[in-house]
Image (cartoon, rainbow, N blue to C red):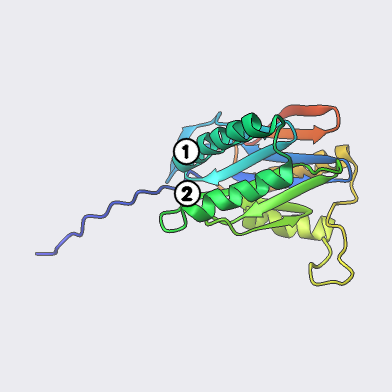
C-alpha cells in the first residue's frame, strides 16, 4: 500500500503581471486584472495596483492575501509618518520602507513581488523593483509576475537601460514621452497575454505626473 504524504502550503501564487516605466517627469505603472489559482480564474476584475501616497503607487503580483496584508501595514506606517512629520512620504522614502517591511518578514516572507513607481523629490519618474525579501533597486523600467519573463526581454530591446556598472553613473529614466510609454505598455501586455495563461482580461494603467494620477483601462484576451 502506497503512503500518501499530506501536503499543505501557507502560500499560493495568484499570477498576473505588473510593469512600471519611469520617464523624465512621469511614471507609468500597469497591471492586468486577472486573479487565478492553478487552472481556475477566481476573478477577472481584481486591481493589483494600490496608491500608497500622492506621488507613489505600488503594483504587486504573487499571493494576493499576503499583498493585502502588506498594503494594510504600509498604509498604517504611512499614517504614523504623516502624524509625526505633517507631510506625505516621498517615493524614495516609501521604497526604503517597503524594503524594510519585506526584510523584517524574511524568515516567513510576504509572497509578493512588487514594483513601486512614482515621482522622486526632484519630480523625476522613479521605479523600484523588489524580490520577496526586500532586496531592491532603482531602475528605469521593471516587470514582476507570471508574465515578467516574456515582458522584460521586450522592454530591454525597446528601452536599453544603461548598465549600473558604467561610470560615471547614468540616469536610468527612459527617453520615451508619456504617450509613447503608455503605448509600449499596451503592446507588451497584448504580447504577454498571448503566451501567459495567468495574464489577461483587462489592463489597468496608472500614469503619475505633476498634474496628479490618471487611470485608464484596456481590454485583453479573456481566454
Q: Is residue 222 visible?
A: no
- How many residues crowd around disc 1 within 10 Å: few (fewer than 14), some, or many (20 or more)? few
Whether pointer 1 and pointer 2 mark residues with C-beta atoms closer than 8 Å, the reply is: yes
Disc 2: which residue = 110
Please, what secondary structure does the residue beneath circle 1 have? helix
* Residue visible at 69% across and 39% down in the picture: 30
User: Is residue 104 in sight in this rendering?
Assistant: yes
Residue located beneath label 1 in the image: 69
* Residue 168 - label: none
Check the picture and name the quadrant holding the C terminus: top right
Left or right side of 15 for 150: right
**Lower position in the chain sequence, tag 1 or tag 2:** 1
Q: Quadrant of residue 24?
A: top right
Residue 44 horizontal/vertical position (percent): 54, 31
Which of 93 and 143 lies nearest the eye of the viewer?
A: 93
Residue drawn 59% across and 31% down?
A: 79
Amino acid at each position: 500500500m502506497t503512503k500518501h504524504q499530506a501536503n499543505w502550503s501557507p502560500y499560493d501564487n495568484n499570477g498576473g503581471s505588473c510593469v512600471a516605466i519611469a520617464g523624465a517627469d512621469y511614471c507609468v505603472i500597469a497591471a492586468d486584472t486577472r486573479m487565478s489559482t492553478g487552472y481556475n480564474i477566481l476573478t477577472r476584475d481584481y486591481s493589483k495596483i494600490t496608491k500608497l501616497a500622492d506621488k507613489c503607487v505600488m503594483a504587486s503580483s504573487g499571493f494576493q492575501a499576503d499583498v493585502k496584508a502588506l498594503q494594510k501595514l504600509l498604509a498604517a506606517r504611512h499614517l504614523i509618518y504623516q502624524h509625526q512629520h505633517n507631510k506625505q512620504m516621498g517615493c524614495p522614502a516609501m521604497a526604503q520602507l517597503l524594503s524594510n517591511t519585506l526584510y523584517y518578514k524574511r524568515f516567513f516572507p510576504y509572497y509578493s513581488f512588487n514594483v513601486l513607481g512614482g515621482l522622486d523629490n526632484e519630480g523625476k519618474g522613479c521605479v523600484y523593483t523588489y524580490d520577496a525579501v526586500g532586496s531592491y533597486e532603482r531602475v528605469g523600467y521593471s516587470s514582476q509576475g507570471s508574465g515578467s519573463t516574456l515582458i522584460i526581454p521586450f522592454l530591454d530591446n525597446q528601452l536599453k537601460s544603461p548598465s549600473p556598472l558604467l561610470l560615471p553613473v547614468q540616469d536610468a529614466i527612459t527617453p520615451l514621452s508619456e504617450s509613447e510609454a503608455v503605448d509600449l505598455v499596451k503592446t507588451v501586455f497584448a504580447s504577454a497575454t498571448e503566451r501567459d495563461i495567468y495574464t489577461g482580461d483587462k489592463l489597468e494603467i496608472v500614469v503619475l505626473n505633476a498634474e496628479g494620477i490618471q487611470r485608464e483601462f484596456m481590454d485583453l484576451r479573456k481566454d
